[in-house]
Amino acid sequence: MNATTRIIGIDPGLRRCGWGVIETLGNRLSYVASGTVTPPHEGSLAERLAILFADLGDVLDRFAPSEAAVEETFVNSGPRSALILGQARGVALLAPAVRRIDVSEYATNLVKKSVVGTGHADKTQIQLMVKTLLPAADFKGADAADALAVAICHAHHRVANMRLKALT
């Protein structure tokens, strides 16, 4: 745990997929980059998923994280929306996995609790705490902030996750 670890957090979505890259050394966090992948609204689902996969791949290749964290999505809308979001989430899991990057998953409430201190924080609270924890962060929009929150959550839980994986 004495080496710097680069982590990408991904907030999956087919319309807007947020990503955020941080580095951690011990309990020290530093901002690297963040953004949002926005596939076009037109085209078939397969074409849009392919663009999402390619664009996430470009981000992964450019920033070369050694670990990835993906938020488990919570959907309160219809089954079709949930299915499409699930497919986008599959792409968000696959893109780092095919590059042999270890991928962890975190529930939305755990991400919020890890970053804000409450599992029911709103988007404004998340953005404020991300900016507090990563003062150099220059994110544009809630999706990139959420992705940085996922990366921060992973930074807090990664050692325990590694120990659990070693036991199985």
Image (cartoon, grey):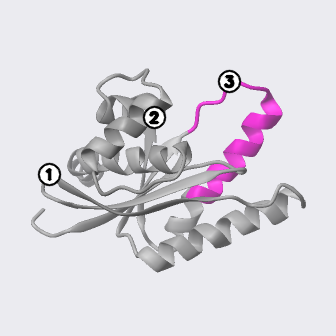
The amino acid beneath tag 3 is Asn
Earlier sequence position, callout 3 versus callout 1? 1
The spot of residue 8 in percent (x, y) is 41, 60
The spot of residue 85 in percent (x, y) is 70, 43
Q: Secondary structure at mark 3?
A: loop
Q: Nearer the viewer, residue 8 or 102?
A: 8
> Where, quadrant-wise, is the N terminus in this rendering?
bottom left
Pointer 3 and pointer 2: residues touching (CB < 8 Å)?
no
Identify the main secondary structure in magenta. Answer: helix
Determine whether 56 is above or below 107 in the image: below
The amino acid beneath tag 1 is Asn
Q: Secondary structure at mark 2?
A: strand
Q: Secondary structure at mark 1?
A: loop
Q: Identify the residue at the far bottom of this view.
A: 62
The amino acid beneath tag 2 is Ala
The spot of residue 153 in percent (x, y) is 33, 43
Is 8 one of the magenta-colored residues?
A: no
Earlier sequence position, callout 3 versus callout 2? 3
Q: Say left or right for 155 vs 9.
A: left
Is 89 one of the magenta-colored residues?
A: yes
In the rendered structure, which segment of residues is drawn in magenta?
A: 73-92
Is residue 161 visible in the rendered structure shown here?
A: no
Determine whether 2 is above or below 83 in the image: below
Residue at figure coordinates x 68%, y 24% from the top left: 76
Where does label 1 land, which residue? 27
Pointer 3 and pointer 1: residues touching (CB < 8 Å)?
no
Residue at figure coordinates x 90%, y 61% from the top left: 43
Residue at figure coordinates x 26%, y 45% from the top left: 133
Q: Nearer the viewer, residue 165 or 110?
A: 110
Instruction: Mark 3: give few (<14), some (14-19) or many (20+) Cα within 10 Å.
Output: few
Residue at figure coordinates x 76%, y 40% from the top left: 83
Quadrant in which residue 52 is drawn = bottom right
